[in-house]
Image (spheres, rainbow, N blue to C red):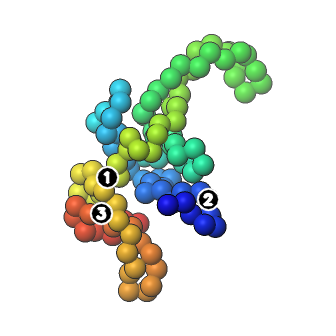
Amino acid sequence: MERKYNKIAKLHIKKGDMVQVMSGDDKGKKGHVLEVFNTKGRCIVEGVNIVSRHTKPSAQNQQGGIIKKEATINISNLMLVDKAGTPSRIGRKLNDAGKLVRFSKKSGEIID
């Protein structure tokens, strides 16, 4: 069902979360989320999906050459890792203060 007011989807992953790659070339790798692109449904994970960029010499990079860096990966291929170190699905519930918080469906722990 399409959202009525806010067209950007609510994602289960946020910047700084520890995630595990569930499918693709980097399956099984874990890393921290560096950046999330809500509208595209993709994010950059530290040490995952490394690509080679051929760059010209510039003011920032005077040498130029081939640079290895992380590329975006689809959020559907990622699963959040809870404090126990196991990948788990995420749910949302109201806490005692009436604030919506994320929790691990496997262990039931609240994720900060």
Looking at the rendered structure, the kind of residue marked 1 is Val
Q: Which residue is mark 2?
A: 7
Between marks 2 and 1 in the image, the one whose residue lies nearer the viewer? 2
Looking at the rendered structure, the kind of residue marked 3 is Ser
Q: Position of residue 57 (x, y in %)?
A: 73, 16
Disc 2 is placed on an element classified as: loop
Q: Is residue 71 left or right of residue 82?
A: right
Q: Which residue is mark 3?
A: 104
Q: Cα distance, mark 1 to mark 3?
A: 9 Å
Q: Position of residue 97 (x, y in %)?
A: 43, 86
CB under 8 Å between discs 1 and 3: no
Looking at the rendered structure, the kind of residue marked 2 is Lys
Residue located at (52% from left, 46% from top): 41
Between marks 3 and 2 in the image, the one whose residue lies nearer the viewer? 2
Residue located at (22% from left, 64% from top): 107
CB under 8 Å between discs 3 and 2: no
Residue located at (54% from left, 60% from top): 2
Q: Is residue 35 visible?
A: no
Residue located at (35% from left, 52% from top): 80
Work out whether 59 lies above or below 29: above
Q: Cα distance, mark 2 to mark 1?
A: 27 Å
Residues 50 and 61: in front is: 50
Quarter residue 28 falls in:
top left
Q: Is residue 21 left or right of residue 70?
A: left
Q: Earlier in the sequence, mark 2 or mark 1?
A: 2
Q: Which residue is mark 1?
A: 81
Disc 1 is placed on an element classified as: loop
